[in-house]
Image (tube, coloured by chain):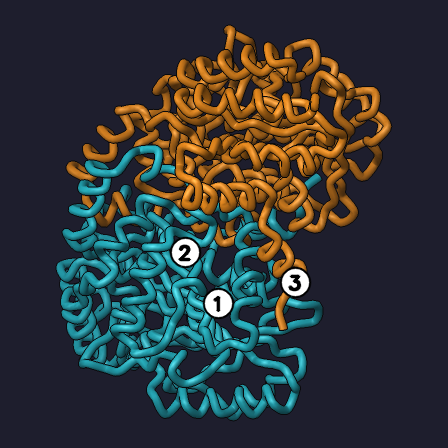
Chain colours: A cyan, B orange
Amino acid sequence: MFNEKMHKLGSNRSVIRELFEFGKALAQKEGKDKVYDFSLGNPSIPAPSVVKESVLKQMDIKDSTVLHGYSSAQGDADVRKAVADHIRKNFGCAVDENLIYMTVGAAAALCISLKALQEDGDTFLTFAPFFPEYRVFTEMTGASLCVVPMQKDCSLNLVEAEKFIDEHTKGIILNSPNNPSGAVFGEEQIKALCALLTKKSAEYGHPIFLISDEPYREIVYDGVFVPYLMNYYDNVIVCYSYSKSLSLPGERIGYIAVSPRCTEAQELYYAVCGAGRVLGYVCAPHLFQRILVDCVDAPTDVEAYDKNRKLLYSSLTAMGYECIKPQGAFYLMMRSLEEDANAFSEKAKRFGLLLVPGDSFGACGFVRISYCVSYDMICRSLPAFEALKKSYSL
Amino acid sequence: MFNEKMHKLGSNRSVIRELFEFGKALAQKEGKDKVYDFSLGNPSIPAPSVVKESVLKQMDIKDSTVLHGYSSAQGDADVRKAVADHIRKNFGCAVDENLIYMTVGAAAALCISLKALQEDGDTFLTFAPFFPEYRVFTEMTGASLCVVPMQKDCSLNLVEAEKFIDEHTKGIILNSPNNPSGAVFGEEQIKALCALLTKKSAEYGHPIFLISDEPYREIVYDGVFVPYLMNYYDNVIVCYSYSKSLSLPGERIGYIAVSPRCTEAQELYYAVCGAGRVLGYVCAPHLFQRILVDCVDAPTDVEAYDKNRKLLYSSLTAMGYECIKPQGAFYLMMRSLEEDANAFSEKAKRFGLLLVPGDSFGACGFVRISYCVSYDMICRSLPAFEALKKSYSL
């Protein structure tokens, strides 16, 4: 009748979506002020004003048939140049606009990159904790995903990674700043990972690609440094999205940047174009491509998130919760007060707290708290966290 | 290194794209007024003014974090309701907004529908002439595409179709008004097709789906009637796009409507949701979802296309060319003056005429002429068509 796998993926809503729907129902029953929804990763700060200005300008000056017409499949040339200029200026590496491919957000960028790389028998690797859709996207291509177990501090577990890499390993999906942990992998870790991949590529006689999923690149705190992977390794594919940096998740705009230092970079780029075509991505939404010419350098307002982070981290640790201090993104991982984080999440619901159990992220015993919410809601939620804690010491 | 199939699909540009690029180069060399580009299907009329008004209104009144935030994966509820209301009002059939899934254009709608349906060993059928990407999208899912050969008048070849349908046939992709022929399949043909599918579904003990790819639905001439398939058959999935009707091809907005009369419609809808998830379509672009609430009933301005159609058809037939008179869309099929339409297309280039050879559409011996161009360009191109004709009578 229809594809069973698709049916299963469509009918089993993700844990996050379930929690969100539960919260909506609870708010209707108990009142909105009784629900503290920390489930979703939807930016809580508005898009920078230059976005609106640019949209209005484009709508005003551009011929409708051009503005809303098809762009070339890889994106408008001047948009790709603006993106490449931004990368060159900010990260000092030699990217090529002709190796940039505009995408319908980061999910599309990942699907297309994986589809472009995948050959029979391939596996991709990622490090726990990880974004659960990596598994869905990887398996869609016919490849499988290996997950390197989580380290206590959420740093890269390279000793374990080495055991997982074999002749079938086509690439590593890296996500820094990380969802769900908020970890940023520093230069030392990145250098060690790249050394490992260089060694293993030589050992197996084929490149192992580093696929950098970096929608949270600009959202970092305390001036922490995020190494730009193309400066450390040759076979890098960057998957980027403006969902978080410009607060435009619903507009689905991002890109793939194939490093010019990749083995056969031009041919790999063709494979990216083919994968985009095969998956039905005709072009990235054109109006939101165009605005990038004006907005690509717009600074991300991380202050609001940082204020939330500080309040939440300091309050929760003061209450006696064990938290991993986030250095980036807008997620905080907190240890569950019982072994089963699902049971803990269920219990938290009774206090109006919606916390995502970490199991699907490969972080058993933890919950993820999304703090892209209003400061006010965090303030109001603190007594609930207090009461939840108390309920475990009775 | 990377996926060979993707590489091939990305490096071999489509014939249409090749022609378009050739035209750009020729225009630079010989002057823009010497090139008559009939290659692309990019709407030549601007989006209706209500689109701009709606965008400006949305940007003005809506909270940025909501307007540009994620929508639910299937699309905003009120947007789906507006789409369903439009269908109910215009086609008098009982659709359900909870069986509508907003998509990133019609290509995504097709990919998602095919992926949702596909099981091991499945084939899909389509009628020549057909849009060549159907093959790419079908094969992406793991299924194969059977093409029923073209009839001289581009009507549905049901005698041949019956021979192609077997126990592996999962569905038929139908495209009316048709790209590239401009044909509209009338009620008699549709009834006969549906009767055949009903008979074959019973014979093989499983539903054969009718996948209606209808981005040109509103672009019809001389008051021709386009039957709404849900009124004629149970197992219908409609794939729609606002690319042509609202002249928004670059913004990638469309939908899938699963007929409530489908066998296990709700379960099939879940499979659609799963397929959208797997292919990386997080949600359809949100701003252009929102404007549909205002624009879903905006009339399509077909007058300009009709004027082009009449001029082109009457002029070419007067010159002695054999043309299939289009009843819809903005394409006209003209018989090649030599057996090999590729050679004919090559020769036409010497006269500045960019005509797409029909081979990849399953229409050997024909060229496709896209008349979504300026009336002025058609006028200026006529002497070139005359000269091309003459060159064959020397």
Q: Nearer the viewer, mark 2 or mark 1?
A: 2
Image quadrant where residue A366 sits: bottom left
Q: Position of residue B292 (x, y in %)?
A: 34, 30
Tag 2 and tag 3 share a subunit = yes
User: Of the residues shown, which amino acid type is indicated by label 2?
Assistant: Met
Ranked by sequence position, the earlier of labels 2 and 1 is 2
Q: Position of residue A355 (x, y in %)?
A: 34, 64
Q: Is residue A364 visible?
A: no
Q: What residue did someone put label 1 on? A: A360
- What number is the disc on residue A102? 2
Q: Position of residue A292 (x, y in %)?
A: 27, 54
Q: What residue did someone put label 3 on? A: A142
Mark 3 surroundings: few (<14), some (14-19) or many (≥20) residues within 10 A: some
Mark 1 surroundings: few (<14), some (14-19) or many (≥20) residues within 10 A: some
Query: Considering only vertical position in the picture, is A165 above or below B76?
Result: below
Observer-nearest of B218 and B229 = B218
Q: Disc 2: which chain?
A: A
Tag 2 and tag 1 share a subunit = yes
Ranked by sequence position, the earlier of labels 2 and 3 is 2
User: Of the residues shown, which amino acid type is indicated by label 3?
Assistant: Gly
The secondary structure type at the circle numbered 1 is: helix
Query: Considering only vertical position in the picture, is B159 above or below A83?
Result: above
